[in-house]
Amino acid sequence: MYKSHTCGELTAKYAEQEVTLAGWVHRRRDHGGVTFMDLRDRFGLVQIVTNSDLYPEAHKAMEPVRSEWVIQVKGLVHMRPEGMVNPEMSTGEIEVEVQEVKILNPAKTPPIYINKDEEIDEQVRLRYRYLDLRTARMRRNLVLRHQVVKFIRDYLDENGFLEVETPILFKTTPEGARDYLVPSRLHPGEFYALPQSPQQLKQLLMVAGVERYFQIARCFRDEDQRGDRQPEFTQLDLEMSFVEREDVMRLAEDLFTRLVGELVPEKRLLQSPWPRFTYDEVMTRFGKDNPDIRFGMELVDITDLAESSGFRVFESVAEGGGHVRGIKAQGLGDYSRKQIEELTEFVAQYGAKGLAYIALTSEGEQRSSFAKFLSEETLVEITRRFESKPGDLLLFVAAESEITFESLGRLREFLGARLELTDPDVLGFCWVIDFPFVMYNAAEDRWDPSHHLFTSPMPEDIDFLDSNPGKARGQQYDMVLNGYEVGGGSIRIHNRELQSKVFDLIGLEPEVSQERFGHMLEAFEYGTPPHGGIAPGIDRICMILAGEPNIREVIAFPKNQNARDVMASAPSPVEEEQLKELHIKLDV
């Protein structure tokens, strides 16, 4: 070994012991005949000292050494002189007096700061990711991610689960996002697909009698990028036999409640047990099915008041079956017209054609874009419903339900962040249940599954599949944290007849469902137990626990916003010979 100890483990108990250390030079400070350096490895920092009078050869060997050089030193651990202790370092009581030095590798000046916490362009960080990962921030994130995965594995092992790996090369079964396709050399013209999730395989493991399965699964989806998306991501894939919805939810809640308490005790749960909301409730109250419940500012419906309000914009929307909803932003009553126009532009990107307002200034005055059209009685009732007072800004959107929910739900979270209502040290877990089983796709005149093809309807709603599909609820459940869906699951269909009925409902022709899912339908004929599961996203959960703005900060080698690996320049062209072997001809 190049080292007898790590840089982070040395404390006063090692005083006067001889040690051998190896790592990177973090900082250098010259004081004439004495040179101080901070030596860094993955485990921490320690101050090392060379003295030209005591060990002239070691001091001379250190002369060319600069930041990020890799060195090995041997020396004695000494207590620091009185007044020189550094309480910011775990090793701050001691220093190592260097007697021997060996340069293991010099280094060019890095293109990014490693020993400073400064803003650096993300593209540069990703280009030199192997250097970025040396920083304290990224090292903390990697350690946290490791701890999260280890905790999950230990917890599930203690609860009787088996970790089973499933194939990365599988069958393409389009169902939502685009598949990443892999051409087969041995079978010209045929393709594997990278799994969007191991959904079918984990259900087949239940058919196989595994009963309790999990996997830290790599998943792949060819979709547009966002701060909480990557082309390849990691999820905890979990499936259980002989369970009902409550069993899966209870286990997942206990797992992550314990995980938070052990790994991030500085954070606190907003509520425990986690609150539960129906889909209809979260849409009505928050405008989103993945709400941030750490603050209020909930939506208020005034459609009934709009119908005869005297304000034609509101009246026409209400008459056409739309809705008028609003939110109350406390403390923004003195917003200028320009500031309100900024908010109007914000909601426009979500389909809202305008943003009506009533501003109650801190001095008790009232400004509004539409109040002059209202009767005094209607205006009083609106302000009463919002429980408004001086200093409040009431903001309204009039449109069909989807647009009022989307625009106000987004605006609510935008203003919640602006008003600093979202404490990053508070974790607002909640469950959302009772989703619609299917959603009507008017453009293609068909029903689409709201979750996936294998989710079971609520037992009491199965008859609705024939008479009124839009009224049926699915046995699915979403795990939500601080405004992100961090996990989704459901009780699955385990009966061939019901699965075939669902395929028929969503418009899959029998020959198509047989070609894509015949292996599943056949498996269901061989004694399939009732089963269900959930798939929490490791990346999103680690992002929130680490307090990071996007999941790229908790992934070692992520793609950028354009789904490119700028470090390795991927994707990249391939040689013509490779394409010939795969029987592929490009038409770009």
Image: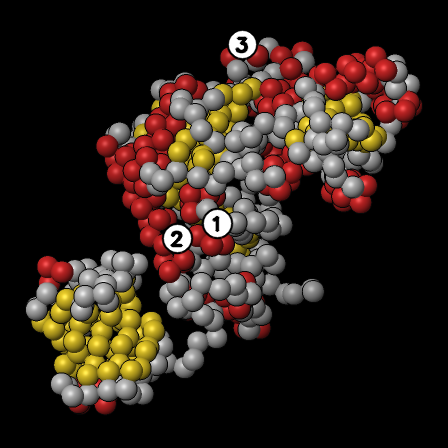
In the rendered image of this protein, does residue 16 appear above or below residue 104? above
The residue that appears at 39% across and 53% down in the rendered structure is: 141
Mark 3 element type: helix
**Dot placed on the residue nearer the N-terminal end, 1 or 3:** 3
Q: Name the foreground residue: 174 vs 81.
A: 81
**Dot placed on the residue nearer the N-terminal end, 2 or 3:** 2
As shown in the figure, which amino acid type bears the numbered disc 3? Glu
Mark 1 neighbour density, 10 Å: few (under 14) some (14–19) many (20 or more): some
The residue mark sitting in front, 1 or 3, is: 1
Q: Where is residue 105 in the image (x, y as percent from the top left)?
A: 30, 81
Would you identify the image quadrant in which residue 207 lies?
top left
Mark 3 neighbour density, 10 Å: few (under 14) some (14–19) many (20 or more): few
The residue that appears at 53% across and 15% down in the rendered structure is: 458
Mark 2 in CB contact with mark 1 (< 8 angstroms): yes
Q: Residue 432 carries which label?
A: none
Which quadrant of the rendered structure holds the C terminus? Answer: bottom right
> Is residue 108 in sight in this rendering?
yes
The residue that appears at 32% across and 41% down in the rendered structure is: 263
In the rendered image of this protein, does residue 243 appear above or below residue 556? above
Q: Where is residue 360 in the image (x, y as percent from the top left)?
A: 75, 29
Q: Position of residue 437 (x, y in %)?
A: 59, 22
**Dot placed on the residue nearer the N-terminal end, 2 or 1:** 2
Q: Name the foreground residue: 396 vs 483.
A: 396
Location of mark 2 (residue): 141
Mark 1 in CB contact with mark 3 (< 8 angstroms): no
Tell me how far mark 2 sits from mark 3, CA to CA. 45 Å
As shown in the figure, which amino acid type bears the numbered disc 2? Asn
Would you identify the image quadrant in which residue 417 lies?
top right
Mark 2 element type: helix
- The structure's colour scheme is secondary structure
Tell me how far mark 2 sits from mark 1, CA to CA. 9 Å
Q: Residue 548 carries which label?
A: 1
